[in-house]
């Protein structure tokens, strides 16, 4: 059986990207054959929790790591716990890239090329002369050993990073595109398309030349878990549009969860949208990746505008011929609405100097 868990970071802010991350897991002991009975209990409701080992603290270098909701792990603006958790996941998937910059093309397969062209987001993986490196394999060994006690194996992680221009094009349209929906629609479609991409990717990579093995794996069901998107309760339409023409069956649409069943490329899918779904450890791990990437994006944005505001201020001083001129004091932002307005006011002269349009940087809603 396959399990895909998805969560987001940056849904509410006015500045910076919306990030959606997905983790893929496989349990070879459940649903190996098409005639294997699906467990009546949803994986996120099982007791004892099959993912409990990942929720226990473990040392990674000098940092204590546990998989939990990113709001519990990322406190005080300290990135080290997120970096450590992402490093453990990176090595647990069997990946060998030494730096985040090397990993980004496969971690962000849809958005990477676009992000390279966005001046304030191109240093997400660190500067060329100072790339962000994953923790050493020796530092993650104890955590990986602890995680390996879980019957579910982490197979891969992928993400989407939707910059402001893409966000605005979807929600507000532009000269060449009509609006496609609101930001809730954007989040739903982005999350489900990422899920379908990851399903295709991990199942293709897992197939072997042995026909019987391929046939068995082609029949493995997929469980998908999402933290429910705000107050949204109904997902039939977006599921149908992303996963194809097979009927979508509503299992539950309640105050606490929305559950659906359908088929995709011959596999049975069950999709769970749950209030506070990030309490489920696989969703929490996706949450950590989304938050990590969002924070690195904001660090890149702040570093870019800090340097450019300094250039703007220097130009003003030079133009004033020694007379006092207004100087915009730079303070970084996390991108949330009230502080974002303060930040935009500070960088407005720089935006004008660089011909940066609002729609390229500032979300319309």
Image: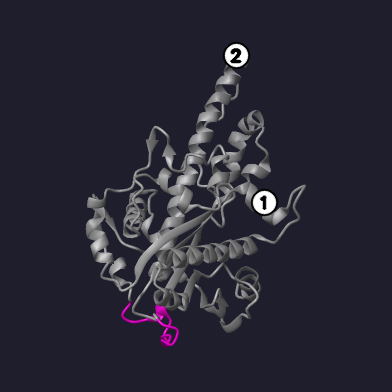
Q: Is residue 194 above or below residue 330?
A: below
Whether 39 is among the magenta residues is yes
Q: Is residue 339 left or right of residue 2?
A: right
Residue stretch rendered in magenta on the structure? 33-49
Classed neighbour count for the residue bearing mark 1: other residues with Cα under 10 Å, few (<14), some (14–19), many (≥20)? many
Q: Is residue 77 left or right of residue 341?
A: left
Q: Residue 18, image x and y in percent?
A: 55, 54
| The C terminus - image quarter | bottom right
Mark identifier at residue 96: none
Task: In this rendered view, identify the residue nearer to me: 263 or 256.
Answer: 263
Q: Residue 105, image x and y in percent?
A: 48, 48
Task: In this rendered view, identify the residue nearer to me: 322 or 131.
Answer: 131
Q: Which residue is under mark 2? A: 323
Q: Which residue is under mark 1? A: 168
Mark 2 residue element: loop
Q: Is residue 184 left or right of residue 198?
A: right
Visual colour scheme = one colour
Q: Residue 355, image x and y in percent?
A: 67, 32
| The N terminus - image quarter | bottom left
Mark 1 residue element: helix
Q: Is residue 284 above or below residue 294?
A: below
Q: Residue 235, image x and y in percent?
A: 61, 74
Q: Are marks 1 and 2 in contact (CB under 8 Å)?
A: no
Whether 64 is among the magenta residues is no
């Amino acid at each position: 059986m396959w399990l895909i868990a998805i969560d987001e970071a940056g849904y509410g802010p006015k500045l910076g990207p919306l990030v959606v991350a997905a983790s893929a897991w496989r349990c070879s002991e459940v649903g190996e054959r098409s005639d294997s009975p699906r467990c009546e209990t949803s994986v996120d409701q099982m007791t004892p929790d099959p993912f409990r080992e990942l929720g226990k603290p473990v040392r990674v270098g000098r940092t204590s790591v546990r998989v939990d909701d990113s709001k519990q792990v990322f406190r005080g603006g300290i990135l080290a716990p997120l970096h450590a958790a992402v490093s453990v996941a990176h090595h647990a998937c069997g990946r060998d890239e030494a730096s985040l910059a090397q990993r980004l093309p496969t971690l962000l397969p849809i958005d990477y090329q676009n992000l390279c062209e966005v001046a304030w987001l191109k240093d997400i993986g660190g500067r060329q002369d100072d790339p962000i490196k994953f923790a050493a394999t020796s530092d993650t060994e104890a955590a990986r050993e602890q995680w390996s006690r879980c019957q579910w194996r982490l197979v891969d992680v992928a993400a989407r990073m939707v910059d402001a221009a893409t966000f605005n094009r979807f929600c507000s349209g532009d000269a060449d595109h009509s609006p496609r929906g609101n930001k809730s629609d954007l989040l739903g479609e982005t999350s489900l398309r990422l899920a379908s991409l990851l399903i295709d990717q991990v199942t293709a990579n897992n197939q072997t030349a042995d026909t019987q093995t391929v046939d068995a794996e082609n029949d493995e069901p997929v469980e998908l878990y999402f933290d429910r998107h705000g107050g949204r309760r109904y997902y039939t339409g977006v599921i149908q549009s992303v996963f194809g023409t097979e009927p979508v069956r509503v299992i539950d649409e309640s105050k606490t969860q929305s559950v659906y069943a359908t088929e995709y490329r011959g596999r049975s899918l069950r999709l769970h949208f749950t209030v506070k779904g990030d309490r489920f450890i696989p969703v929490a791990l996706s949450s950590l990746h989304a938050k990590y990437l969002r924070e690195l994006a904001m660090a890149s944005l702040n570093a870019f505008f800090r340097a450019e505001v300094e250039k703007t201020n220097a130009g003003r001083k030079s133009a004033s011929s020694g007379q006092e001129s207004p100087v915009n004091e730079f303070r970084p932002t996390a991108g949330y609405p009230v502080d974002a307005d303060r930040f935009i006011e500070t960088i407005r002269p720089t935006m004008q100097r660089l011909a940066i349009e609002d729609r390229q940087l500032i979300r319309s809603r």
